Amino acid sequence: MTTTHHVAELARELSRSLTEMRSYLRRHMQCKIKEHQLDISFELVEILAYLWRKDGVNQQEIADIIIKDKSSTTYLIDNLVKRDLVKRVEDGNDRRNKLIYLTPEGRLLQEKFYPPVIALFETATQGIQVAAMEKAILLINKMNDNLKQSL
């Protein structure tokens, strides 16, 4: 087996492992959602979690982060607006653009739900050094860049 072929096989296994980890994270999050008796989906929590870190972003940025197309993201944000968790505000620099902000209800949900989310990621990273996490992020970002450029 050539080195290139071996690296490709390792990349395939890494991809499978990342998919498995996402599945476990999703299942844990769904349990947390039930524990807190929230009527909300995992996809909506993904958007809220991003806004909890960076409020006031446009829909395209959210779509890029949650890896969904713009129309699916619009549907999800519409759902959050109906639940009074976010609001759309006209961008002062470009009136065609809408920025998404948390409402007071969305911030209240953050206070209730964000600590268990952080605890989940602390569990996932037990025994892993910061440097190892940083290297893993660089590695995966490099692979993503390679794939983007090959499209």
Image: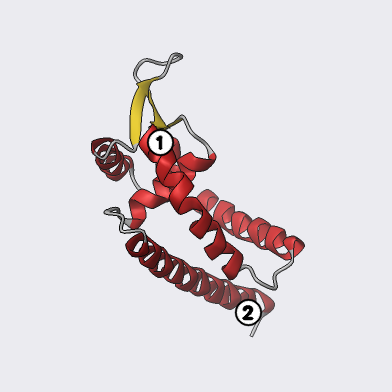
Residue bearing mark 1: 60
How far is disc 2 from disc 1 in space, using C-alphas?
A: 37 Å
Apparent side of residue 148 relative to residue 103 in the rendered image (left or right): right
Q: Which residue is drawn at 44% across and 71% down?
A: 24
In this rendering, the count of numbered labels is: 2
Horizontal and vertical percent position of residue 94: 41, 16
Task: Classify 127 as above or below 83.
Answer: below
Does label 2 or label 1 sit earlier along the sequence? 2
Task: Classify 88 as above or below 32.
Answer: above
Q: Which mark is residue 91?
A: none
Instruction: Say what amino acid the circle numbered 2 marks.
Output: His
Q: Tell me which corner region of the image, top left, top right, bottom left or bottom right, holds residue 143.
A: bottom right
Q: Which residue is drawn at 46% across and 14% down?
A: 93
Q: Which of label 2 and label 1 is nearer to you?
A: 1
Residue bearing mark 2: 6
Horizontal and vertical percent position of residue 2: 66, 81
- The residue positioned farthest toward the bottom in the image shown: 1
Query: Considering depth in this image, is 63 or 25 the residue closer to the camera?
Result: 25
Horizontal and vertical percent position of residue 103: 38, 32
Task: Classify 6 as above or below 90.
Answer: below
Instruction: Say what amino acid the circle numbered 1 marks.
Output: Gln
Q: Is mark 2 on a helix, strand or loop?
A: helix
